[in-house]
Image (cartoon, coloured by chain):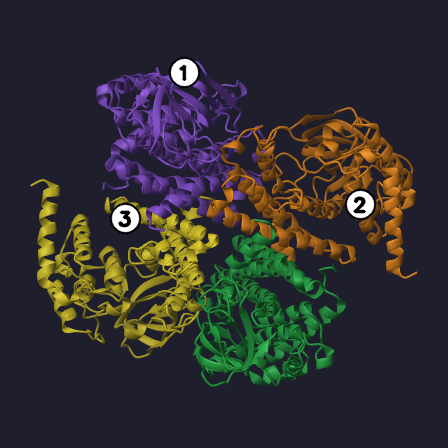
Chain colours: A purple, B green, C orange, D yellow
Amino acid sequence: MTSLLETEDETMLRDAARGFLADAAPVANLRANRDQGRPFDTGLWREMAQMGWAGVLVPEAQGGADMGHRAAGILAEEMGRTLAASPFISSAVMAATTLRAAASQQAEQALTAITEGRLIYAVALDEGRKHAPLNTALVAQKAGNGFRLTGTKAFVADGGSAQRVLVLARTAGSAGEAAGLTLFDIPADRAGLHKMARATVDSRDHAQMVFDGVEATGDEVLGTLDDGWALLARGVQAGQAAVAAELLGVAGGAYGMTVGYLKERKQFDRTIGSFQALQHRAAHLWAEIEVTASAIANAGRVLDATPTQAGLAVSLAKARAAQTVDLAVREGVQMHGGIGMTDAYDIGFYMKRARVGSEWLGDYGYHAAQVAAARGF
Amino acid sequence: MTSLLETEDETMLRDAARGFLADAAPVANLRANRDQGRPFDTGLWREMAQMGWAGVLVPEAQGGADMGHRAAGILAEEMGRTLAASPFISSAVMAATTLRAAASQQAEQALTAITEGRLIYAVALDEGRKHAPLNTALVAQKAGNGFRLTGTKAFVADGGSAQRVLVLARTAGSAGEAAGLTLFDIPADRAGLHKMARATVDSRDHAQMVFDGVEATGDEVLGTLDDGWALLARGVQAGQAAVAAELLGVAGGAYGMTVGYLKERKQFDRTIGSFQALQHRAAHLWAEIEVTASAIANAGRVLDATPTQAGLAVSLAKARAAQTVDLAVREGVQMHGGIGMTDAYDIGFYMKRARVGSEWLGDYGYHAAQVAAARGF
Amino acid sequence: MPETAALDAFRTEIAVWILSACPAPLLGRPMGEDRIVWGGRKWQFQDDDQKTWMQAAIARGMTAPRWPVEYGGAGLSRAEEKIYREELERLQAPPPLESFGLWMLGPALLEFGTHAQKLAHLLPVTRGEIRWCQGYSEPGAGSDLANVQTRAEDMGDHWLVNGQKIWTSYADRADWIFALVRTDRDAPKHKGISFMLIDMNSPGVTTRPIQLISGKSPFCETFFDNVKVPKSYGEDNPSVVGQVNRGWDIAKYLLTHEREMIGGGARGLLGGRSLGQVLGDLDGAMDDPVTRAEAMRIEVNALAFAMTMERYKDQAEAGRGVGNASAMLKYYGTELNKERYELLMSAAGSEAVEWDGPHGSLAPEWLRTKANSIEGGTSEVMLDIIAKRVLELPNS
Amino acid sequence: MPETAALDAFRTEIAVWILSACPAPLLGRPMGEDRIVWGGRKWQFQDDDQKTWMQAAIARGMTAPRWPVEYGGAGLSRAEEKIYREELERLQAPPPLESFGLWMLGPALLEFGTHAQKLAHLLPVTRGEIRWCQGYSEPGAGSDLANVQTRAEDMGDHWLVNGQKIWTSYADRADWIFALVRTDRDAPKHKGISFMLIDMNSPGVTTRPIQLISGKSPFCETFFDNVKVPKSYGEDNPSVVGQVNRGWDIAKYLLTHEREMIGGGARGLLGGRSLGQVLGDLDGAMDDPVTRAEAMRIEVNALAFAMTMERYKDQAEAGRGVGNASAMLKYYGTELNKERYELLMSAAGSEAVEWDGPHGSLAPEWLRTKANSIEGGTSEVMLDIIAKRVLELPNS
């Protein structure tokens, strides 16, 4: 496999992204969005699309940049650093990867629309409080030539803003089985689909989706009937790797803000960064971030090289990212002292996003168990 | 329940024990015993018996001091502090508690002999690498008026020096069941009982005992046939509490040695105890020891007040003690630096005893699970 | 009568009194922060029962059981007060009155104040008439509490106070504030501070609430803009407690109290149920070995910590102080509570991250625990105290 | 020929050479510390195959592949050396020769030595004729390596060396030692140290092995009692490497090397099997949620750490140094390895605590891991380095 070192192209991409986001989407934007009840900034998302980010995983034939998952991870990481909100992971990573694997003409049209920033997708997957895709119980019942979907999806990221939804439904089998799951690609304003916005601590777009006899045609089945999970799993893995990368960025952002504070803040007539106990904790945190960065780079590389064998690499990345960002935000808030507890200060936003991102698409325990299974125990 | 504070009597007992052990059994004794291949010092044990320690749990009618489990814990803790080796826990705590509960005339005679230091008991219990008394598979087969014992007991503490053995054997039922276990009280030199000394890292007396058709009479059944576990469980719980107390002492001894070193050792032209990172770690360790001390005191109190309901209290004490002593010896060795790694220095002995004591009669995982079960999960 | 018999008699007497004085509707109600009776001029009872109960307690001195009768207390012994608290808990009766005046100002004045100061200030506290807040922290000072910049200039008959305090709980609802102010700018940091009592109605005092990451909070910023504080509120009743420039001694004395109170917050949080039981309500949570192992660890530590609180309390009640070791309670209790909430959040998964989701106020409570290891002295300061004063390690 | 094609050709060539030069009985044998070929005057091969293999490697310069040919090396590029190591591993051939001379002295001399020094000292190293040991640490200095008390007095034509070194690995079997000695007692601590090459056969040099808590060890104490060290071993071949009093620069340079080597010890320890698989061999161990959760955690961290080693190695090989960040590898790798052994000990229970129990040398290995976070710079020193040089936090 290629080295885990960044290529020159990747470094250029990172530098460009970092520069752009520092200007266009500093943490202050998240605060403004929150205070104005806006889950993300549509103008910003358009700019990202113009830079090719929305099409980072889309083939050139559909107008995409086709830069691969390592590049997508770099973008997600940089967005995490400034907590920039966008439908990037839902739409440009998860939906795009799934649609690309579906390889239908309809899917290709959708990919072009995603790339151009005209179309936002959400993925309606989990139904309970924890990530467990095979437990899908939302039913798609045969009705004439089509289907009728009934059930509830919890915690659909970007579910409020999406124009289309990939929804995993059960057409056969029972909870816990992959067989019998079918993937539908339907418009989000279809009759009977009720979206309830959830006020989450990270101030982003999350919705509960209630499917009250929602009709779907046979053409709206993506991939094969009863075998939709094989297809969506590719998108979910890509999403897990991207969320892991975002969390690495969140950790890095919190760490950077904290070390900056340690260097500037004085107490007991000393810069607090000169206190050895804090130094050792900051150094340990840095070490954890470095080690996690390797797992993130590896997940991107493996997804690009051997996407069908990426399970271990992706779960390793998400497990490490969840643990590392947790440490980073806890240390960040504690080391900021009282000021870190105030809403007026930004470090709290990192803690809130870390919590949601760690949960999304599987937490540490879920992914550590996947690693263990892949490693034979 | 009485307060967890020490009574005046208990404080006097502690002070007396500490004074005696500092003189008569400093860590240097352990080194001398090890270098001379002696698991413990019989003269020292005689002196302890003369002070009433061997009879601390024996009724006055049998010549004992009958001071209770809290007092036994204080003695065990002080022995732990200087790593004083003796058959105290096997004989004076586990066997004595069991024999006392048996309340037979034979048992009373044995208690007197224990009290006077004339008789050392071992308890032959576990057969595998982890504590799991109900998994007892050693068979006691009916043979005429008596029994024939066949099987192997692993890791019998004080098994090499004991003159008598309490051995748990299966007379009915199958592995995992408490019913069908019978307790025998037999001389350690009975034909067919082979003792293999084990060279353990703590340089104490541990033996594997192979029972090769060992004969036991019906009179040698302690308590009731097929119901021996109920009786022995009392002794085992008392032993667990005492080992926990010993480990608290081991933690305290390692901590004391380490803080002493921090105050005296200079490096980079500074006393290393002035480095804040070490200060915070030492302070945290002290906090853990304080919290564990409460759990140890509580276990003794509960064993004295309501011995039949002591499971939670005892497991809590052992779980805490295992975790705390582990931290104490790891920090102790690391903070001593290179010198701590040399055999010439004492801190390594604390690490070795901590490892064995944490394992003996159930490790952290075993006891934490017991706590969880007692707390309804 | 032997001592224990006297205490038994007292237990019966006080239980009878509680049952007769505390209106039945108050008994057995769940106690939340919203049900606390704080008192003060701006105070409004939620119902008449609260008022009835408070006034009955005032009449018997039971709002401040251990204070001397002449200052509005009941003059109880330590042992008697403990019995009173135990009976309140057993009968599920709420405390008749809570306040910073009772918790903090009282102990300070009883230890350092003049007779006239005690009379003037403590009686209104015990009667729920005056509500106090505490003005220690300042912006930019953080853990360095002695870094007091709010200054009080000596203007002859009054002090002229200018500066700013932060983290003053309920300052917007308090009538008076006890504050650390700098009365000597040339003295070493700890030597020029005074402990001053200031009427919040004085011209120039303003407050502003602070929004936390967890949402609304009782914390305020408090500003002093040319506030005139009389040197004396009456004969032998100066506005400064103890000696001028020696206020740090009083602050240190009170910090020890505060630490014990905050560290104790970790107990009884789940209404007597174990953490594992609460988690067991969430389908499948306890099947995850990571969650189970962590729940076991926290349960073990929480039980042992509760015993330690008990042991330290007994020691304090036995008249042997716990001194700087109280820093351990603060440190251990708040860190443990943070761990507990992290696990609860994780087990409740995506439901937990909603501000008002199916688990009620879990998210804001989780974020709020993060402040516990900062307010009242950070965990780092607690570890410093343990290292230097308990372990006696040398200064760096 | 494009670069990759050339490397492919080299890979084939070197594989053929290994298979022809390395006697078949050596291939595929498990590699243990007892199978290492160290060389030196006191060295005795375990069998003729070892000797045959070493001499074949010497003939081709492959005991020191990247060193210049004139000093006994093969003059390979970074990429070629990497291929050589990969092929050795793939074909399960042992390294023909290992030594502190190759690992430590070589890099120091190549960077700081004169041509004559390199010729005189490096050739015997590549030929396995002279075995070196390293004399840095001193009793009482601990982590403060610059606190060198062993002194070398300038006696005109020679240095007179007196003092004591500790933790000198295999000093009792070494022919020469490279040591830090104090040549200026008045200069600041780091400025009066020289990097000196001393013949262990010199009168006045004695060694004594050190017993560790884990048992016998390669470590020794080394004593210098009025040892005369010539100023020069020949023309342009002084006994001090680099400038007199500037030896600290060389020591720092080598410390970075050493750190990377020790931190790497955590990899591949279990013969390619995962920790969970090894634990799974122990009946029931993985049913315990505490053990399972801990095994998962260590597995996750170990895999990510292995990737980090890989990444840092690639970075170094790409010619971009990792500098002080290597302190992280040392810190993380040794701490992780301690955790791994704690878990193995716990899972093997009472069987683990025997010196020679059913799990072989587990107990001494467990105790030995405790030294890994001390030797070559303690974890605390590594964290200091990261904090000050990588994070650039201010000095305390």
**Disc 3 packing (10 Å; few <14; some 14–19; many ≥20):** some
Whether the residues at callouts 3 and 2 have beta carbons within 8 Å, the answer is no
Residue B340 shows in this picture: yes
On screen, residue B224 above or below C245: below
Q: Which residue type carries mark 3?
A: Lys
Residue corresponding to mark 3 = D313
Q: Amino acid at mark 2?
A: Pro
Which amino acid type is shown beneath numbered disc 1? Gly
- The residue identified by callout 1 is A43
Q: Nearer the viewer, residue C116 or A239?
A: A239
Separation of disc 3 and disc 2 at Cα? Answer: 63 Å
Q: Reply above or below: A146 against B301.
A: above
Task: Give the CA separation, mark 2 to mark 1.
Answer: 59 Å
Q: Residues within 10 Å of mark 2 (few under 14, many from 20)?
A: some
Residue B367 at x, y percent in the picture: 55, 58
Q: Nearer the viewer, residue A244 or A361?
A: A361
Q: Which residue is mark 2?
A: C107
Q: Is residue A198 above or below residue C324?
A: above
Q: Pointer 1: residues within 10 angstroms few (<14), some, or many (20+)?
A: few
Q: Are marks 3 and 1 in contact (CB under 8 Å)?
A: no
Looking at the picture, does residue B140 appear above or below residue D292? below
User: Mark 3 — on which chain does it sit?
Assistant: D
State the separation of the CA atoms marked 3 and 1.
42 Å
Among the 4 quarters of the image, the one containing residue B302: bottom right
Image quadrant containing the N terminus of chain D: top left
